């Protein structure tokens, strides 16, 4: 089978999740840049909508199938390439890791993404809106991670929770959230950023980074 | 082990997802009502925050563990009680089902939930905001389901996609979204509502329904 093709935008935090998992599992893939701003957004071309009706990156093309939605892709990669694992084996532990994932991917990121900010009537509200939802989500996340973390989000091994945390902290920094309130999140993020998979997949290292 | 305890609010669409899976898998559980409005919201009591720092239902207590985030709970139930299955066995098929799940649980529901609506400055914007995000998500979902559906969202067997679809259609109806634009969604929803697991778990049949 040909290499998977990842349709990506360097700054997309949802796509960074997938890039981390691909790098962590050492899966070779082809990078296809989709510019979310240029010419009104390349995700709105009919060619792209045929790949993903949600008009979003990431899309991972495997064989003749286009997979979309980042957590669905992460679960696919975990099932297709189980080693190195990004989920623990114990069922309750898996549920706790997935709860961290979902707190970020359903509870925080959707509320601060660009299409939502653009829908706010008053442009001056965009920054404060994003900061509010990130900070209030991080209050819960900090409490969750106090209970589950070791070196990383769940004990001392890298999991899908970590894969989602780092891109969300990156967004928090872009929006100017004060991270001093969240010592556990900050500590784990720093640990993770020392790992090769997180470094090599970062926005700054993508070919389309401006 | 004692029966699982589900902390639920009858009208919570995220909790309905879990109730459907429990009913479909015929898992006996104890129902614990959490009134999201009474006395400012019972989810804000310290006792509840100890269970779930996100201050949301659902919470499923199994043994001495409190699981939260609805999709994490659904994945747990699927792993703990694999039959009857709510995910297909083929890996790409699982990814397609999970993409439908995530389109609803990350792409639509978070944008129309109560805490987000309450954050909009102008009260008159709340209804239109919810309708906008549901309708624009449903445009993508309709296209996705045209490609994958048979009798239900993915072929002719009930999956996690169906478990998430019905509560989202219920929300769409509450907000007055015109469903005539979405014939595939409407048809699948009608099919599903004939199934016992979807009927018995519905908001109208919950003990805390007013």
Image (cartoon, coloured by chain):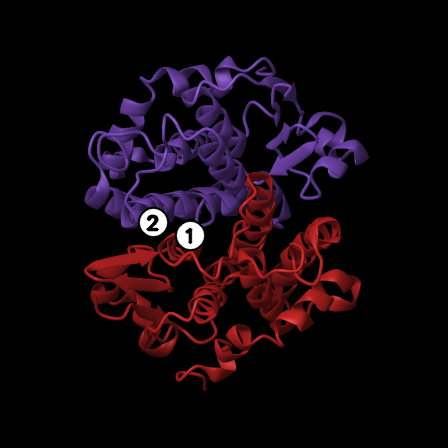
Chain colours: A red, B purple
Would you name the residue on which mark 2 appears?
A: B95
Would you name the residue on which mark 1 appears?
A: A75
Query: Please, what secondary structure does the residue beneath circle 1 have?
Result: helix
Q: Nearer the viewer, residue B196 or B190?
A: B196
Quadrant housing the N terminus of chain A? bottom left
User: Which residue is found at the position 53% from the left and 49% from the top?
Assistant: A106
User: In this rendering, is residue A47 above or below A52?
Assistant: below
User: Which residue is found at the position 45% from the left and 61% from the top?
Assistant: A115
Residue A192 as seen in the image, left or right of residue B159: right
Number of the label disc, if any, that sits on residue B58: none
User: Which residue is found at the position 43% from the left and 22% from the top?
Assistant: B25
User: In this rendering, is residue A194 above or below A155?
Assistant: below
Q: Nearer the viewer, residue B178 or B196?
A: B196
Residue A78 as seen in the image, left or right of residue A164: left
User: In this rendering, is residue B201 above or below B17?
Assistant: above
To which quarter of the image does residue A182 belong?
Answer: bottom right
Q: Are marks 2 and 1 in contact (CB under 8 Å)?
A: yes
Residue B19, horizontal then vertical, whole percent: 50, 24
Residue A148 as seen in the image, left or right of residue A181: left
Q: Nearer the viewer, residue A70 or A93?
A: A93
Query: Please, what secondary structure does the residue beneath circle 2 have?
Result: helix
To which quarter of the image does residue B104 belong?
Answer: top left
Tell me the CA gap for discs 2 and 1.
7 Å
Output the chain of dot 2.
B
Residue A207, horizontal then vertical, whole percent: 40, 84
Across the whole image, how many numbered discs are drawn on residues? Answer: 2
Looking at the image, the residue that sits furthest to the bottom is A210
């Amino acid at each position: 089978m040909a290499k998977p093709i990842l349709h990506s935008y360097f700054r997309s935090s949802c796509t960074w999740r997938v890039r981390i998992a691909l790098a962590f599992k050492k899966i070779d893939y082809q990078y296809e840049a989709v510019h979310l701003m240029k010419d009104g957004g390349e995700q709105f071309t009919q060619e792209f909508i045929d790949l993903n009706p949600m008009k979003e990156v990431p899309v991972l093309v495997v064989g003749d199938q286009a997979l979309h939605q980042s957590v669905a892709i992460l679960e696919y990669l975990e099932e297709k390439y189980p080693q190195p694992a990004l989920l623990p084996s114990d069922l309750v532990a898996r549920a706790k890791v997935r709860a961290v994932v979902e707190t970020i991917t359903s509870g925080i990121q959707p509320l601060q993404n660009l299409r939502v900010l653009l829908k706010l009537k008053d442009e001056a509200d965009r920054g404060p809106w994003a900061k509010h939802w990130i900070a209030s989500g991080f209050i819960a996340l900090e409490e969750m991670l106090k209970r589950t973390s070791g070196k990383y989000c769940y004990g001392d091994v890298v999991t899908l929770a970590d894969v989602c945390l780092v891109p969300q902290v990156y967004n928090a920094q872009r929006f100017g959230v004060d991270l001093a309130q969240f010592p556990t999140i900050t500590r784990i993020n720093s640990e993770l950023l020392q790992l090769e998979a997180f470094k090599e997949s970062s926005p700054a290292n993508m070919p389309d980074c401006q």
